[in-house]
Amino acid sequence: MDNRFGDIETFLMVASEGSFAAAAKALRLTPSAVSRSITRLERRLGVALLRRTTRALALTSEGIAYRARMATLLGDMQDVESSLGQDGHEPRGMVRINASPSFGVACLLPILPRFTALYPAVTIDLTLTDAIVDMVEERADIAIRIGPLRDTRLRAKKLGHSRMALVASPDYLARRGKPVTPDDLDAHDCLRFSFRRSVDSWPFRIDGRVVQRPVQGMFFGNSGEVVRQMAVAGGGIARHGRFHVARDLAAGRLVEILADHNPGDGEDIHALYAAENRASVRIRAFLDFLDAHMTVAE
């Protein structure tokens, strides 16, 4: 009997779990049954989807492409089947989201309870990381990106634009003094990002021109959230998107400095998704929700 959809689901589980044994446990099958299912699928397609060694299991390039397409197609099938007998359009299923910790904490988490209240049949799987992950490898449906877009294979929905600001805590400024000109930063600790070590300067508007000014300090952080918390704790001066520090500025935990020298630069914020995912009811519901409820401090 041809059970091609079962073979596809087995392959997706193996790709997700990373081994036949783990996939077999999740599917309540024997490892040999899983192995036979993968063999049938590869024989039918005429390509190798998995690269097997004695110690590891990895997807081939064909396997990566096949997983991306099949995961989308099966997700859409689940949407259609779940909607039958309901209202025909009720979102349900899993939405996997990837975002930076700074954006996730400041902008996503405060509004997610509203989404889950609106769509109780949708499960949110949120991963926060400053690493630029491969959406196919991580099986992400939507990725929030800040700054220039590089992956032209994906569709992008603009969520907003956030200008940059130089900030420090009142405690730090009381101890170290408030900079009046960019040159005053030579006497201060500037908080920088470890994933941007090649950028050791900040832009300032000086005499009508934008000038890159070298900065220095004793601290590097591997995420925007780490650097923000260091600034709130009085560890130095940081340069952040306003969306990330808006609440701290409003609460007085941070204050803006050198505003007269701010060059007015900023970063666009987009939600990225695969073109074929836009047809999915659950993905479309989340994108529309972001459009209606997302507020990005500029």
Image (spheres, helix red, strand yellow):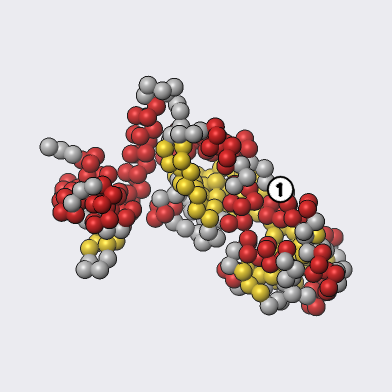
Give the x, y percent position of residue 93.
42, 37
Please name the residue shown 35% across and 34% down the image: 78
In the picture as drawn, the residue positioned furthest to the left comes out as 1
Q: Residues within 10 Å of mark 1 (few under 14, many from 20)?
A: some
Q: Secondary structure at mark 1?
A: loop
Q: Is residue 183 left or right of residue 123?
A: right
Please name the residue shown 78% across and 53% down the image: 251
Give the x, y percent position of residue 183.
82, 74
Give the x, y percent position of residue 114.
59, 37
Query: Along the line of sight, which residue is nearer the eye, 264 or 36?
Result: 36
Q: Which residue is denoted by mark 1 in the rendering?
A: 297
Give the x, y percent position of residue 239.
71, 63
Amino acid type, callout 1: Ala
Above or below for 36 versus 85: below
Above or below for 82 versus 63: above
- Is residue 173 at all visible to an observer of this figure? yes
Q: Quadrant of residue 59?
A: bottom left
Q: Quadrant of residue 252?
A: bottom right
Please name the residue shown 46% across and 37% down the image: 122
Q: Is residue 53 left or right of residue 281?
A: left
Above or below for 190 versus 78: below
- Is residue 39 at all visible to an observer of this figure? no
Please name the residue shown 35% across and 44% down the image: 71
